[in-house]
Image: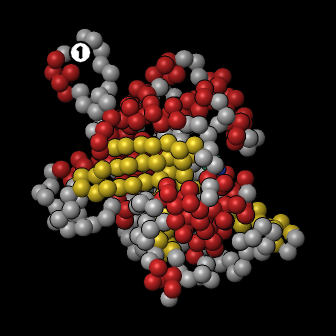
Amino acid sequence: MAPGKAPARLKQPSKSKKEGGRPAFKQQDKTKHQATPSEKPGDPTATVALGSLQTLLNVFRNAFSERLASDVKPLLQQVKQHLFNREFLEAFGKDEYLEAYAVRWSPSRALGYAQIFHDLHDRIIEKEPGKTTDQFRVVCLGGGAGAEIVGLAGFSQQFMQENLSEEVKEDGPSKLSVDVTAIDIANWSPVVTSLQSAITSPPPLSKYASAAVKEANKELLAPEAFQTRFVQQDVLSMTPEQLSAELKDATLVTIMFTLNELYTASLAKTQRFLLMLTEALPTGAQLLVVDSPGSYSTVTLNGAEKKYPMHWILDHTLLSTTQGRKWEKTLEDESRWFRLPEGLKYPIELENMRYQIHLYKRLSQASSDS
Ligand SMILES: C[S@@+](CC[C@H](N)C(=O)[O-])C[C@H]1O[C@@H](n2cnc3c(N)ncnc32)[C@H](O)[C@@H]1O
């Protein structure tokens, strides 16, 4: 949509949950979390094992042990203030702010994302009879802070554990080789490197650890099974060529708690970016958008400003058929909760996460032409 132009034929946002006919997730809430009126029966809760979730928290503890041992509160106050003022470039403008953000906000999100990827596994892992390893190539836009990376590591580990016990599967792979590219405007490179190392190296042990403990001390994932790459880049100023180079082999692109920031920076540039992304992605690739529920963006309509729900504008851009049918929306839920199970240990407070979720699948050229 051009800047200042009215969005043509915006549909009324649907209030109902649409899950492509899949059953709702089981409710297993063990937390003391207070129910709010917006919660629904059937909200998914942690089905990823407690031990796996704790292992993911340990990744953050090991990656940032010095930061966590220091008084991180003053830094967090400053970051919070910038985020509150919506000064995103300032909030993510210093190495120490980035690390403070990563230890405070990424762990809860990482656990929630491990659960989201786990919930979606039969949609995002390609089923090919006889195939034992799936190459899962994920590009995380705005994913430098590490939550998606650690969430994917948790998902991958759980996926392999669940499939290990089964006989060679006839209906799909039992191993994953995950390749994550995080593209972000801020320089999260040191954070990504520390997390990659904490995921793919055995955790540090006390020098008094027994031989048996040392023997059993293994990395979460083998380095060849989990690779990360960081690209510092403003996605809104990428050229079609740059974007194609990053996305040409992607199986999944994620935009998690970032789309609203992009719309805030520039609605027109974000629309343009999403159209470029559509052209750059191969058939069958999926786009996962997760954000705060009820995010609104302002659109100028006949000279007057009007607010539309974020996902409504997104649907309008991706599902508009003026250029042929390019995407199929396979999942939509305007509000879900990830609730933390009891018993997790982490030096900083963890939070339940409420989110909206949207999954789209890139259709083939033939569908576009029809
Ligand atoms: C609220 S944080 C979310 C981080 C992470 N995706 C998560 O879910 O925890 C938004 C992220 O988007 C990044 N970001 C904002 N504008 C961007 C842009 N134009 N290009 C690339 N990254 C951007 C920020 O640097 C930040 O890492």
19 w.r.t. 41: above or below = below
Picture coordinates of residue 106, whole percent (x, y): 51, 39
The residue lying at 40 percent from left, 75 percent from top is 21
Direction from residue 64 to residue 135 in the image, left or right: left
Picture coordinates of residue 313, whole percent (x, y): 66, 68
Instruction: Check disc 1 and report its element: helix, strand or loop.
Output: loop
- Kindly identify which residue carries mark 1: 209
CB of mark 1 near ligand 1 (< 8 Å): no
Number of other residues with Cα within 10 Å of mark 1, as a class: few under 14, some 14 to 19, many 20 or more: few
366 w.r.t. 193: above or below = below
Q: Based on the displayed image, in which of its 4 quarters is residue 2 positioned?
A: bottom right
The residue closer to the viewer here, 23 or 34, is 23
Of all residues, the one furthest to the front in this rendering is 241
Direction from residue 283 to residue 188 in the image, left or right: right
Q: Based on the displayed image, in which of its 4 quarters is residue 275 positioned?
A: bottom right
The residue lying at 43 percent from left, 59 percent from top is 250
Picture coordinates of residue 356, whole percent (x, y): 55, 59
- Asked if one can make out residue 201 in the rendered structure from this viewpoint, the answer is yes
Residue type (three-letter) at the residue carrying disc 1: Ala
Picture coordinates of residue 203, whole percent (x, y): 32, 26
